[in-house]
Amino acid sequence: MRVFKLTILSMLAGFASEAHADAWLDFLNPDGLFKPSTFTQVVITKGERTVYISGQTARDADSRVVGVGDVRAQTAKVFDNMRTAVEAAGGSMADIAKITTYIVDLKPDDRIWIGEMVKRHFPRPPAHTLVGISALAAPELLVEIEAIAILD
């Protein structure tokens, strides 16, 4: 009986870790707005802790830029850095409610591959603002993404 209880508790713990963000984040695409597949129109928070993650760039732990000249490679590194940041706060990518992405020399078609990367890194796409800019803090940086996570 004890093994059965432990098995059930383990299964519930695994389920809770996957679904915990749903407990304090409601993702809505209301009628009257288009239904995007790469972001969510409205995210309502019910959690107790708000985590603000500074704009992440394609710098590694030694401040070297990864993927110089390659915006997609840089974006992949940015998402890796974001994961590290949110996990350091005790959360996961599922806890991120909002991101803002800044892309140097953004082209209209860039939103397609950016949206696909967002879908790949988030279990449910957060609210997302995509902004084209002329430059970031260092000339070799092509993308920066900031985030807001909600934890309980």
Image (tube, rainbow, N blue to C red):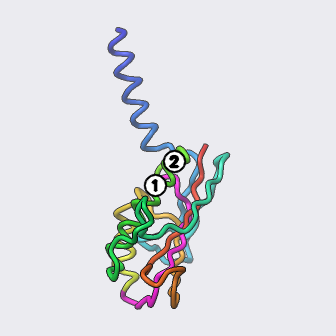
User: Is residue 146 positioned above or below 21 on the image?
Assistant: below
Q: Is residue 101 left or right of residue 151?
A: left
The x, y position of residue 16, in whole percent, is 46, 37
Q: Residues within 10 Å of mark 2 (few under 14, many from 20)?
A: few
Quadrant containing the N terminus is: top left
**Near-viewer residue (21 or 90):** 90
Residue at (42% x, 69% y) in the render: 58
**Near-viewer residue (119 or 57):** 57
The x, y position of residue 15, in whole percent, is 41, 37
* Mark 1 secondary-structure assignment: helix
Q: Residue furthest top?
A: 1
Name the kind of residue labelled 1 in the image.
Answer: Met
Residue at (61% x, 43% y) in the render: 152
Can you tell which mark lies on residue 88? 2
Residue at (54% x, 80% y) in the render: 137
Residue 151: in magenta span: no
Q: Is residue 13 left or right of residue 27?
A: left
The residue range painted magenta reads 94-109
The x, y position of residue 73, in whole percent, is 32, 73
Can you tell which mark lies on residue 93? 1
User: Is residue 47 positioned above or below 79 on the image?
Assistant: above
User: Marks 1 and 2, Cα distance to the nearest angstrom?
Assistant: 11 Å
* Mark 2 secondary-structure assignment: helix
Name the kind of residue labelled 2 in the image.
Answer: Ala
The x, y position of residue 103, in whole percent, is 46, 82
Mark positioned earlier in the residue sequence (1 or 2): 2
**Near-viewer residue (68 or 43):** 68
Q: Is residue 54 visible?
A: yes
Can you tell which mark lies on residue 9? none
Q: Residue furthest right?
A: 48
